[in-house]
Image (tube, helix red, strand yellow):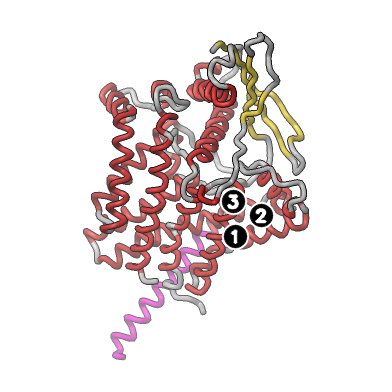
Amino acid sequence: MSFEQGLQWMTWLLCWSLGLQCVEYLRTQHMTSARGIWAWSVQQADIPVSNPGMRSLLDKLYSPAWHATHLWLRLCVVVSMGVSGVNLGAVMFLFVSTLLILVRWRGAFNGGSDFMSLVVLTGLLIEEVLRVLLEPELAAKAGLWYVTIHAISSYFVSGWVKLMRPEWRSGRALTIFLNGGVYGPLPQHSLLRHPRLAMLGSWAFILWEGFSPLALLHPLLALPFCAIAALFHGLVFWYFGLNRFFWAWMASFPAILACSGTLGSPF
Amino acid sequence: MTGVGRNAAKIRRMSSRLTLVWIALYFLLLLLTLRWSSKIIRGPWLFLLRAFFPNWKFFHAVGYVPHLYVRHLGPDASWADWHWVYPRKTRRLWQLVHNTDVNLALAEQNLLDHFANDLNDLPEGEDARQLVTYQLVDRLVRFDLDRRLGSGAWQSYQFEVRMERSNAQGIEATETMLRSPECTA
């Protein structure tokens, strides 16, 4: 996959992912209303801003009517970027809009998926800013490498921290976490309750995650790596309901595929 | 290929190899940082903008996690049993593209995690009710009672945050971290 193609696919997948997230945000507005759990009247005390002008600006931005307008505008920008392609104005708007939404949800609505969406968006922002100064291919390369390093780091860290924990090495953690999943607990006779199978599953994912940087060496390694990653995120959705994780990480795969093997493969 | 062209290709190859070495060193350093327990830098803005500093440690350790329990005073003026507020949903394939209810339920659990962290950090003798997270969890409790019982079906309520540890069979250890005062509807 060329850098240009990688950029195009990353933009499409990010737009799809952000679009789905935006529709979900629109459906959670009752939770951020005055009667909702995350009412701004309560949550505003969390914001470390003493300037009255800034405070009143935030009060205005997070009022239900403005918040709804913001979300609809965001959805329109996402759709237009998906259809007509990436441009600096749209990416900057989405970047600021993402920050506003993160602050509204006390730093994150859905943890890792918010973080990865921001990584991919930042990659696009880097590419668009550099495109003004450098040749397009170099700008695309910088943006895609930014996303790739973060995406591979996410698997790498996740794998090695598990390897350092005895409960993951024994497979016990897998059963415990699956029992606690939103679609759980596991059925009494589930194969994943079997200690040996749980250990095998744990080790398979620990090794795959821990050796994720190898995917950078050649496209023939990156392709199966991304295919297994899609399966992995599919299983995470299946057991934990984390649909946003699936799409947020999918958006980073074109970057991995475009960057793999561009650094002087040893093969 | 001319001599100049050969040299340019050689420089490009060497530069690529060098970048590969830098990337390998980065991952090695990342691995070493996982072994060190460094001082955690905290601050309100850092908390709100933590998306810029993702640590990518998901589901990494099994241990005590906060659970929310609620009980209510019914119309017959007797307290109901403690109820564990925990999301259990039915899986549907289409939720891969739209899963608002589950994501909200997960956000509720995240809120509880932050509340437990805030309680841990609360100086001795301070009133937890001043915490923003306390007030948000209190609203969550009211929301849960309305959702489960219907509004008007409860007069008063009380909630507890318990730190609980699970094994493969279920919850194996529990400690009460906080019990709220009795609150009225």
Q: Amino acid at mark 3?
A: Trp
- The answer to whether mark 2 and mark 1 are in CB contact below 8 A is yes
Instruction: Find the distance from the CA under tag 2 to the CA under tag 1.
Output: 8 Å
- The answer to whether mark 3 and mark 1 are in CB contact below 8 A is no
Figure quadrant of residue B178: top right
Q: Earlier in the sequence, mark 2 or mark 1?
A: 2
What residue is shown with label 1?
A210
Q: Point out residue A67 in the picture as x, y percentages from the top left corner.
A: 33, 33
Tell me the SS state at disc 2.
helix
Instruction: Tell which tag, 3 or 1, sits nearer the viewer.
Output: 3
Q: Earlier in the sequence, mark 3 or mark 1?
A: 1
Q: Is residue A42 visible?
A: yes
Q: Could you tell whether B173 is left or right of B31 in the image? A: right
Tell me the SS state at disc 3.
helix
Same chain check for tags 2 and 1: yes
The residue range painted magenta reads: B1-27
What residue is shown with label 2?
A163
Chain to which mark 3 belongs: A
Between A204 and A13, the one lying in front of the other is A13
Residue farthest to the bottom, as pictured: B1
Q: Point out residue A190 in the picture as x, y percentages from the top left corner.
A: 74, 51
What residue is shown with label 3?
A238
Same chain check for tags 3 and 1: yes
Q: Amino acid at mark 1?
A: Gly
Q: Is residue B66 magenta?
A: no
